[in-house]
Amino acid sequence: MHSSQDMPVALVSGGGRGIGQAAAWRLASAGYAVAIVSRNIDELRTTAQNIPHALPIVADVSLPTSATVIINQVKDRWGRLDVLVNAAGVAPQMPIVQMSDADWRAVIDTNLSSVFYMLRAAWPLLQHSAAHPAGGKAVHNSGGVIVNLSSLAARDPFEGLGAYGAAKAAVNLLGLAAGREGAACGIRVHTLALGAVETTMLRKLLSVKQLPGDKTLSCEQVAEAIYQCINGPLAHSGGEIIYLHQGTL
């Protein structure tokens, strides 16, 4: 049994529900201490109940000042960070020409800018963990891993998701560039471009009649793919964009 001081540590944004929550639970089941970030304290408490070593953090990752505050809390608690999962996202459905400046900024800042802010702030800790695996040995092979969640909307968006698709296309490119930069210092960057996932966000856009449940991924399936990027067959895919949808499983 690991103490919280020699366990690998993961940080999951958007961890209050949906994919982020499932990812946090999957990592906890694999022996990780997990910091979870959300704007909703009640959702954070629900997620944290199933994580033995949890650090709930109330924050808005779309703000440039939040990332440093979040990373400092993780550093103060555990002194290390091995895995960063960027799962926060919003997807309002509206025509581009009807979007206000505030609508545009909310989509770009939550889906794209937050990935940049978190990646930049976490980089020194991830680099250190790549050189100093948890427990002094690479049991988990997890030191220095970033997993970004993108979307098939990056190349083929539903009607009304042009801004969301543009943000996710930029996430794909940012992950590619960060993966190349990270290779020299032992940081792997993976990007999962997801098809429809059974989440509250999806069902605000499409009804079950429009998109039956058997055509969607479950949050647990995505969480497993995230884990496979960190410690499984997908670990070799650093820098790549992995397209994941129901037909690929």
Image (tube, rainbow, N blue to C red):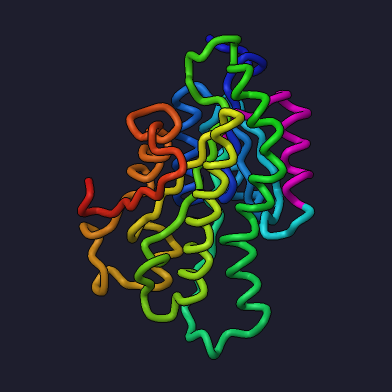
Dividing the picture into quadrants, the one containing residue 102 is bottom right
The residue most toward the bottom is 97
In the rendered view, does 207 fall on the left or right side of 136? left
Q: Position of residue 145 (x, y in %)?
A: 53, 34
Asked if one can make out residue 46 in the rendered structure from this viewpoint, the answer is no
The one nearer the camera, 199 or 45, is: 199
- In magenta, the rendered stretch is 66-83
At which x and y percent is residue 213?
Answer: 25, 60
State yes or no: residue 81 in magenta: yes
150 is higher (above) or lower (below) than 105 = above
Q: Position of residue 57 (x, y in %)?
A: 69, 43
Q: Pick the residue in front: 224 or 213.
A: 224
The image position of residue 191, as x and y in percent, is 45, 48
For the question of whether residue 220 can be seen, the reply is yes
Quadrant occupied by the C terminus: top left
Nearest the viewer among 221 and 177 is 177
- Residue at x 51% of width, y 74% of height: 163
183 is higher (above) or lower (below) than 220: above
Residue at (61%, 41%) from the top-left corner? 36
**Residue displayed at 63% across by 36% down:** 35
In the shown orientation, is residue 84 left or right of residue 241? right
